[in-house]
Structures are given as C-alpha cells and as structure tokens.
C-alpha cells in the first residue's frame, strides 16, 4: 500500500505562509465490520444526511488489486481503507465509525482533513506582515488554538466537485475571519486511487485573496495489521530524517531542529514502534509518546519514500511519498480507553 500527498499550486494569489503537512497516525481502537454493503461493511445510507442545508454522503473508490477506500465529504475524511494481506485477506486498516452521526457526536479527527492550521498556535495569535491576528482558542485552559479551531475543516461539509470509482474531488471555502484567520481561502482536495497499484494519492490546492497562514494535513489513524484490538508497537517503522522539531513544556514547537541521533526519535534504521516509546526522554514525556514532526531528507522528492511502516504478522507494508518537507507521526497518545468503531 502506498500513501502519497502532494501540494499543487499551493497558494495562488497573495501569498502568506504555507506548509501542507503529512500526518502519519498509528493507533489502536475497537473496530468491527457489520452487514456488508461496501466491501468494508459500510452502508451509504448511514452517511447521507443534511446539515444546515448541506448534504453529506459516502463515496467508494476501488481497483482491481482488491483495494477499497471509502470517503465522506464531512470533514473530507477517509472512513475506511480495505487492503489485502500477504494471503489476500482484505481488512480495514484505519480507525473510524460506521455512521455520520457517530462522527458528529464523537468529534474525533479520524481520517479528516485538518485546517486551517494543524497543531497548536501559541496563545492563539500570530503576526504576519506586521499585523497581529488574534484567533479563537480551543485548546482548553492553555489559551492556544489547535487544529485550526472549533469548528475546523474536519467539522465542515465539503462541496463534492467530482466523484467516481477512482477519484473524488472536494472543496471548502473558508471565509475571511473564520476562527480569526485572515483571507477568503478555497481549499481543494483530490483523493485518487491507482488501478494497477494500491496507491492512494492526496493532492491539495489552495487559493487565497489575502496574506494568510495555512498548514493542512490528513489525519487517518492507521493500524495496518487490520486488527484494531492489537497495538501498533510491534510494527516496524522507518523514517528518512536526521532532525525533528522539539516541543516546549506547553506542547508547542520551539522553532528549533534537533538531531534524532542518540534519541528515541531515530528511525533511520527501522525498528519497532514500541522499542523506545516508553524511553525516559523529555520529548516523549511531554506528549506521552510520539507526536512529533520529522524534517524529511527527501526534501520534496516524491520519487522516493519518506517513510514506511511494516506489519510482520500480516505482511502489509505502507510506504509514504510526499512533496512536503516534514511529516508528523502520532501514536494515538490522546485516545482514552476503548472506543467502539465501525460496525459496533
């Protein structure tokens, strides 16, 4: 399985600051399949509703290799990714829910498009071109803004511009001042599934009429074993990165780049995720595991993998290719207890 992200004409018009990131989330939650409508067991009718005059739906991509990807325009999110293991057994490898109601009630970012700005902005304010912008904080008592605010792009109904069995094109117009961010911003996201290889491509495009900031990302929670009652700690991870961005004690990035050498964040030689996740290291303690950005050595070259994760039990391997300079890897540290997923 191949996972690709691209930025295309990333900021047309007046440019501000832009970084379209790739987030690899590795986690465990309880997910079971029920009555099969799609191959993954989802029923389209359970995703068809109307919210403030806007319609939600479920779209299915598939190919002759046996891969199926289900997408909803609520949050422009991936609901399921069904891929075969080494023996041809197809299993879902992403966390999610089986109805649109559950997504709206649980308010999890499973599979969503996060924006305008993934991560935290310290004190919910920033200065651009000499102008200070005050945002709407949503990160508890910290006073920060996280993942673009509440509601963010993950909570919006995206317009469906095109949908067939190999491609879905979605867009969202974020108005000037939404959560305090400047500029009318149109974001377009295209999901496309290769016919001859199990490659899921994500292509982003953004247009703004004023200087602004933008840091988009995809937020699927992967467990490529296909068994969400199992931890991902036995899966092997490799990341082509010599440096990472550290956090301060407020869980905000410091702006520094530190070497991974000699730290638990060194995945230049592949090893299991669980090998060092409990190490006595301040960067792991501040976020209770891995939740960091690695500065990729690929430097925008999407012809070679930036990272991969491999599950020895199933034989599944996911390679990540991206045009972006960095990748965030999160091990689901914020998930509390056992969550009921697809099919109950």
Image (cartoon, rainbow, N blue to C red):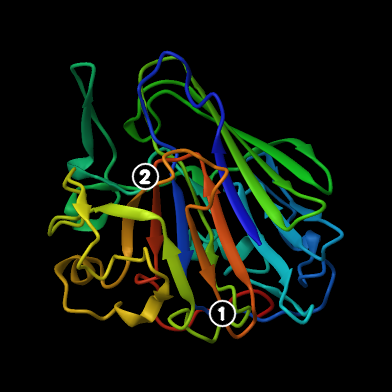
The residue wearing badge 2 is 149
In front of the other: 7 or 155? 7
Q: CA distance from mark 1 to mark 2?
A: 26 Å
Q: Residues within 10 Å of mark 1 (few under 14, many from 20)?
A: some
- Tell me which residue sits at (38%, 68%) in the image: 269
Q: Are the residues tagged 1 and 2 within 8 Å (C-beta)?
A: no
Q: Is residue 336 visible?
A: no
Left or right of residue 165, residue 208 in this image: left
Where is residue 324? Give x, y as percent. Answer: 45, 40
Q: Residues within 10 Å of mark 2 (few under 14, many from 20)?
A: many
- Tell me which residue sits at (36%, 66%) in the image: 267
Dot 1 or dot 2: first in sequence order is 2
Where is residue 303? Give x, y as percent. Answer: 57, 43
In front of the other: 67 or 302? 302
Is label 1 in a helix, a strand or a loop? Answer: loop
In front of the other: 250 or 339? 250
Query: Relative to residue 54, is residue 338 depicted above or below?
Result: below
Per the rendering, the mark at residue 340 is 1
Query: Relative to residue 108, is residue 176 depicted above or below?
Result: above
Query: Relative to residue 67, is residue 4 depicted above or below?
Result: above
Per the rendering, the mark at residue 211 is none
């Amino acid at each position: 399985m191949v996972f690709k992200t691209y930025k295309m004409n990333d900021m047309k018009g007046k440019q501000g600051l832009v970084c379209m990131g790739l987030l690899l989330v590795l986690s465990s939650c309880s997910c079971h399949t029920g009555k099969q409508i799609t191959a993954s067991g989802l029923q389209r009718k359970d995703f068809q509703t109307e919210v403030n005059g806007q319609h939600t739906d479920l779209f299915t991509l598939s190919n002759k290799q046996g891969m199926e990807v289900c997408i909803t325009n609520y949050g422009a999110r991936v609901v399921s990714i069904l891929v075969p293991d080494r023996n041809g057994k197809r299993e879902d490898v992403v966390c999610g829910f089986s109805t649109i109601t559950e997504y709206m009630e649980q308010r999890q970012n499973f599979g969503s498009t996060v924006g305008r700005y993934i991560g935290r902005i310290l004190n919910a304010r920033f200065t651009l071109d000499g102008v200070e912008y005050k945002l709407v904080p949503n990160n508890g008592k910290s006073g920060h803004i996280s993942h673009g605010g509440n509601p963010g792009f993950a909570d919006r109904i995206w317009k469906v511009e095109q949908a067939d069995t190999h491609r879905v094109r979605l867009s969202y117009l974020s108005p000037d001042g939404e959560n305090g961010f400047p500029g009318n911003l149109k974001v377009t996201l295209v999901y496309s599934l290769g016919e001859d290889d199990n490659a899921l491509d994500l292509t982003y495009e953004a247009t703004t009429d004023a200087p602004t900031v933008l840091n988009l990302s995809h937020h699927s929670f992967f467990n490529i074993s296909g068994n969400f009652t199992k931890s991902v700690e036995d899966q092997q991870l490799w990341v082509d990165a010599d440096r990472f961005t550290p956090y301060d004690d407020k869980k905000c990035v410091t702006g520094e780049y530190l070497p991974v050498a000699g730290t638990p964040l060194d995945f230049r030689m592949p090893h299991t995720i669980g090998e060092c996740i409990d190490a006595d290291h301040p960067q792991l303690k501040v976020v209770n595991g891995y939740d960091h950005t690695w500065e990729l050595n690929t430097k925008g070259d999407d012809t070679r993998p930036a990272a991969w994760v491999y599950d020895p039990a199933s034989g599944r391997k996911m390679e990540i290719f991206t045009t972006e300079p960095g990748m965030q890897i999160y091990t689901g540290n914020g998930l509390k207890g056992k969550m009921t997923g697809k099919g109950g």
